[in-house]
Image: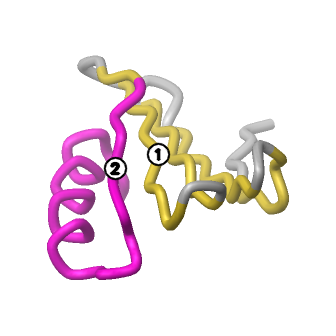
Amino acid sequence: MNTVSSLLAELDRVIESRSYIASVEILDLGKAMLKARLYLDRELLVQVYRNDRFNTTNFVLIQAGRRIFARDEVKR
């Protein structure tokens, strides 16, 4: 199960083991929420959002400022 703490630990592991990730930026971090960006190059990144309170995890691939793919978790 994804949680904020497990995703933070995974980000650390990914930074060390994936040479194609240029950098990671934590945009927002709270007790139950995480928003981070994994930069693959200057114009290509993956944005990760996790909210433990609502049990949602979303991933977005952004190229040149445009959302080109997403995997959103929507609860109905």
State left or right for residue 55 relative to residue 5: right
State left or right for residue 20 relative to residue 49: left
At 20% from the left edge and 81% from the top edge, which residue is drawn? 17
Tag 1: amino acid: Arg
* Above or below for 39 versus 75: below
Which residue matches tag 1? 37
Sequence-wise, the earlier of marks 2 and 1 is 2
Locate residue 23: give its quadrant.
bottom left
State left or right for residue 37 relative to residue 46: left
At 16% from the left edge and 59% from the top edge, which residue is drawn? 12
Q: Which secondary structure, mark 2?
A: strand
Colour basis: secondary structure
Locate residue 34: give its quadrant.
top left
Q: Which secondary structure, mark 1?
A: strand
Which residue matches tag 2? 24
Closest to the observer, 68 or 72:
68
Tell me if residue 17 is in the magenta stretch.
yes
Tag 2: amino acid: Val
- Where's residue 55, x and y in %? 49, 37
- Whether the residues at callouts 2 and 1 have beta carbons within 8 Å, the answer is yes
At 51% from the left edge and 47% from the top edge, which residue is drawn? 48
Q: Residues within 10 Å of mark 1 (few under 14, many from 20)?
A: many
* Above or below for 32 versus 3: above
Q: What residue range appears in magenta? A: 1-27
Point out the image quarter for the N terminus: bottom left
- Where's residue 29, x and y in %? 31, 23
Point out the image quarter for the C terminus: top right
